[in-house]
Image (cartoon, rainbow, N blue to C red):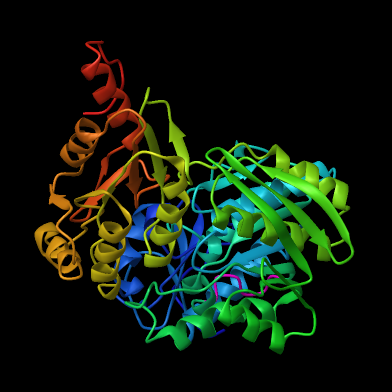
């Protein structure tokens, strides 16, 4: 791994491996990684001040601790993590795709629970075992970085889990965060334009996603998606699902404001299935979860019971109690995701009033497209800010407006004021869609995360409208 230089390598048992000082604990090894934006070597002194006993580096540094030199710190990091935590014994299920990963993961976890398993969930909404938070900080929103991921899996085993369902992002696959893991069943939900600030083009994005199936024993793949069909053609162990095609299918579909019913067909066997999340895309998510369970040997009766038990997922078609107005929070932050949510709302009745913006420091190509989708499929659109990060919110809105062709919109940059305007416009039977933030309870402005919970804002505004006092925490 390299050569040592330092007068004293500590003869002590270490408690962890880390490369991000934000998640450091005392008595650890700190590995200096040269990232896309930061050189980890400049954080070595800070790491020592926070308790690092050993530093792994690729160049000479004077940091007041033992240093081990190596030409490849990233490989050293991976080696140390695997040695420290060991290979996970959990049966792992990985879900990738542009949209639907979170809901599919909750549906699949519910199926596994119905079959008698103790299941962990790793993804955008956090890390849990049977609803209990694992308690390990994630520095990435979907798939944790490798040290946290292995620590989370080890903790899940301690908590009694025998399997885990994890969302697997394209970033994590490119950055080798799931390196060394064996996936029992990989799931592909769909692919549409996103993250093109990170990936060169759609082919590069797809190439990242398909990596999951190189480490998966089985695969459940959307046969109605053009990229899914390519994965099916390349993998003998893949089973397709869909409405138009696939071995596992949905037919005779009835959509309601609070869910859906359909025939869930496994080859020549069919059961009548109820799910409690509305929208045709929710049927696809249910198919993805059902197929993953089916190819992994779960009984159809347990699949049916598990899917029926899912009451909803935070930030995914989440309904708020708002009197005679329907208020829905959804994470839709891609063109395809926004279109699917708006299409599913069209049959509810009343007008659709959409509040949305686009994130800063992210894929700019989708902004104009989403502006067009929102205004074409809503009666009124309130264009606002999302997580502007280090970009000027006004400039992001200008990008959105460049794709707008109708005049059924207003612009209110302040997101709280935008929500207030949407609720004031809404009449009995109307639906207000708050799109883009979903489970997030913060807004990122500059490099600062500020508390911002749309649920609290809606509750406060409705109480103020009704002349009631508000006891929430939003400020």
Magenta range? 176-181
Please state, as top left, top right, bottom left or bottom right, where the N terminus lies in the image. bottom right
Q: Is residue 276 above or below residue 187?
A: above
Tell me which corner region of the image, top left, top right, bottom left or bottom right, holds residue 97. bottom right
Q: Residue furthest top?
A: 468
How many numbered marks are there? 0
Residue 236: where, in percent of width, then height? 79, 85
Residue 74: where, in percent of width, then height? 49, 79
- Viewer-proximal residue among 418 and 143: 418
Tell me which corner region of the image, top left, top right, bottom left or bottom right, holds residue 189. bottom right
Please state, as top left, top right, bottom left or bottom right, where the C terminus lies in the image. top left
12 left or right of 6 in image: right
Tell me which corner region of the image, top left, top right, bottom left or bottom right, holds residue 241. bottom right
User: What residue lies at 31% left-to-right and 63% top-to-bottom?
Assistant: 373
- Viewer-proximal residue among 263 and 81: 263
Residue 363: where, in percent of width, then height? 30, 72
Q: Is residue 4 visible?
A: no
Q: Is residue 464 above or below residue 319?
A: above
Does the magenta-highlighted stretch encompass residue 455?
A: no
Residue 400: where, in percent of width, then height? 19, 65
Q: Main secondary structure of the magenta part?
A: loop
Does the magenta-highlighted stretch encompass residue 178?
A: yes
User: What residue lies at 57% left-to-right and 47% top-to-bottom?
Assistant: 127
278 left or right of 5 in image: right
- Viewer-proximal residue among 61 and 201: 201
Q: Is residue 352 above or below residue 149?
A: above
User: What residue lies at 20% left-to-right and 35% top-to-bottom?
Assistant: 425
Q: Is residue 463 visible?
A: yes
């Amino acid at each position: 791994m390299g050569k040592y230089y330092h007068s004293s390598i500590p003869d002590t048992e270490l408690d962890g491996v880390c490369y991000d000082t934000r998640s450091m604990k005392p008595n650890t090894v700190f590995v200096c990684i040269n990232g896309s934006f930061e050189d980890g070597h400049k954080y070595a002194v800070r790491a020592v001040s926070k308790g690092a006993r050993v530093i792994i580096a690729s160049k000479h540094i004077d940091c007041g601790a033992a240093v081990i030199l190596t030409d490849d710190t990233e490989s050293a990091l991976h080696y140390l993590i695997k040695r420290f935590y060991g290979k996970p014994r959990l049966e792992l299920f990985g879900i990738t795709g542009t949209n639907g990963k979170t809901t599919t993961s909750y549906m699949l976890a519910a199926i596994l629970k119905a079959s008698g398993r103790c299941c962990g969930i790793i993804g955008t909404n956090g890390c849990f075992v049977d609803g209990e938070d694992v308690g390990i900080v994630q520095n990435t929103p979907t798939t944790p970085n490798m040290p946290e991921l292995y620590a989370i899996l080890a903790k899940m085993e301690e908590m009694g889990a025998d399997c885990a369902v994890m969302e697997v992002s394209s970033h994590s696959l490119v950055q080798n965060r799931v390196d060394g893991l064996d996936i029992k069943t990989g799931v592909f939900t769909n692919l549409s334009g996103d993250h093109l600030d990170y990936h060169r083009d759609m082919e590069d994005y797809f190439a990242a996603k398909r990596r999951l199936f190189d480490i998966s024993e089985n695969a459940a793949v959307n046969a109605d998606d053009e990229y899914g069909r390519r994965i099916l053609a390349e993998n003998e162990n893949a089973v397709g699902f869909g409405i138009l095609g696939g071995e596992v299918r949905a037919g005779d579909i009835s959509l309601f404001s609070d869910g859906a019913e359909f025939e869930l067909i496994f080859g020549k066997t069919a059961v009548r299935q109820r799910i409690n999340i509305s929208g045709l895309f929710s049927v696809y998510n249910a198919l993805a979860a059902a197929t993953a369970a089916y190819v992994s040997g779960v009984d159809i009766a347990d699949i049916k019971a598990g899917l029926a038990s899912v009451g909803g997922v935070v930030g995914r078609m989440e309904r708020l109690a708002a009197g005679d107005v329907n208020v829905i929070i959804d994470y839709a932050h891609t063109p395809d995701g926004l279109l699917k949510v708006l299409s599913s709302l069209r049959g509810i009745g009343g007008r659709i009033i959409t509040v949305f913006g686009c994130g800063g420091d992210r894929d700019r190509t989708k902004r104009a497209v989403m502006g067009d989708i929102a205004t074409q499929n809503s009666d009124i659109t309130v264009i606002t800010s999302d997580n502007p990060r280090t970009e000027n919110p006004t400039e992001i809105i200008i990008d959105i407006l460049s794709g707008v062709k109708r005049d059924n919109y207003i612009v209110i940059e302040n997101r709280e004021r935008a929500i207030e305007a949407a609720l004031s416009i809404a009449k009995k039977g109307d639906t207000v869609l708050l799109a883009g933030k979903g489970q997030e309870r913060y807004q990122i402005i500059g490099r600062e995360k500020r508390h911002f919970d749309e649920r609290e804002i809606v509750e406060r505004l409705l109480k103020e409208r009704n002349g009631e006092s508000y006891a929430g925490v939003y400020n």
